[in-house]
Image (cartoon, rainbow, N blue to C red):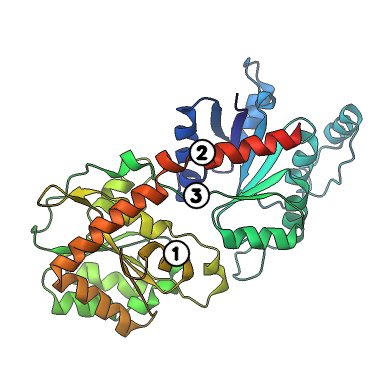
Amino acid sequence: MPGKVLAAHLRDDGFMDGCNHYRFRIPFEELRKHGGVYDWAPIGVIRDWAKSKYPVRPTDYDLWLLPRYRPTPYLEDEAKPEILDAAEKHLGITLERKSYFLDLVRIMKGKIAMVLEYDDDYFTESRDLGYEHTDLLLQMAREVDAVTVSTPYLKELVQKVAPGQRVYVLPNCVAWHEWQGWDRWDLWPKDHVVIALTGSHTHQEDWRVLETVLPRIMVEHGNAVFLGAGYLPDYLEDLVKRYPDRASFVPFADYTNGYAHLIRQADIVLCPLIPDDPFNWAKSEIKAVEGMAAGRLFPGGKNGGAVPITSDVYFYRRVTGGNKRGLTIEHTPEAWYGAIERLIDDHDLRMRLARRAWTWAHDQRSIERKWSLWRDAYQEVLRRKQ
């Protein structure tokens, strides 16, 4: 019988962002179908829950998953000496009293397996993320029972800073049923080609390569449609103003409420990343996979997804398979323009790539096929804990 797992996440506003969506909601919902208890709640709710009289306690779980935890020092009035003294006396442990999250791990890990979870590089200074306590994070990575990550590169990073730590690679996967059967919006003629660019402000510089490319595409191809979502950099804002009939921008959609429908509108998904930015090396291929999985029925009864165009980064090359399921190109304006134009003009090529992309995403990145990776990782952690 699998153990009971609780994801104690940090987001308390009820919004399901991409990290929480892919790192626990999707796998946990699939795991529930195969037996076991897999729940999630914000850490603030868990604190109140622990004080309540509810019959099921947070401490009844066998494993806590801690997504994206980055410990910070106690605030002046945050550390309660009487509580920490009592915990030390009752549990027979020593608390360093440097950080709430560090002390939480030490208090809980005597009974519960504590597992950190990351899908970005927080362990090096490859990008300034405004976090100044990497020393606490590295200590936490060494003290927990295990770490789960989304890519092999992240596994290597964690093992460098936490030698001997158990690290499991659990790739970002889509819930296949959520990405199928959506209707096309009735906003543009059916022969128009929708080009999607979605993501957050962290891609400000990654996307700059498109600054002159997309305006030129819109001028020279009257059947091109631009669909932006999440973040629209200032250097692309004019597209929406200049082409109100062929350009749209949608603020971030909750991943559980319409995001798949949004990506379903795209014929082409753009995935630009600066290849020599070390922060990007730890990222996953999920942006391309989302488009590839966004299923639609083509004439002749065959299914396909959107075709990804990606920068030449190793994990995107693996997804596109050397231009068999998408186009992986140099990160230059000329290459980006050429690839977008090629897919707009060559309908047959776009259809072939779309069908192959959809099949690959189903076989390699659907949680319905990959759920056992999570089960096996958690069960191994629990066996070692016992």
Residue 308 position in % (x across, y down): 31, 64
Residue 372's disc is 2
347 lies left or right of 177? left
Under mark 1, the amino acid is His
Under mark 2, the amino acid is Ser
Nearest the eye: 91 or 322: 322
Nearest the eye: 323 or 188: 323
Nearest the eye: 24 or 317: 317
Q: Residues within 10 Å of mark 2 (few under 14, many from 20)?
A: some
The residue that appears at 75% across and 39% down in the rendered structure is 104
Under mark 3, the amino acid is Cys
Cα–Cα span, label 3 and label 2 = 20 Å
Cα–Cα span, label 2 and label 1 = 33 Å
The residue under label 1 is 201
Q: In this rendering, which labeled residue sits more in front, label 1 or label 3? A: 3
Q: Secondary structure at mark 1?
A: helix
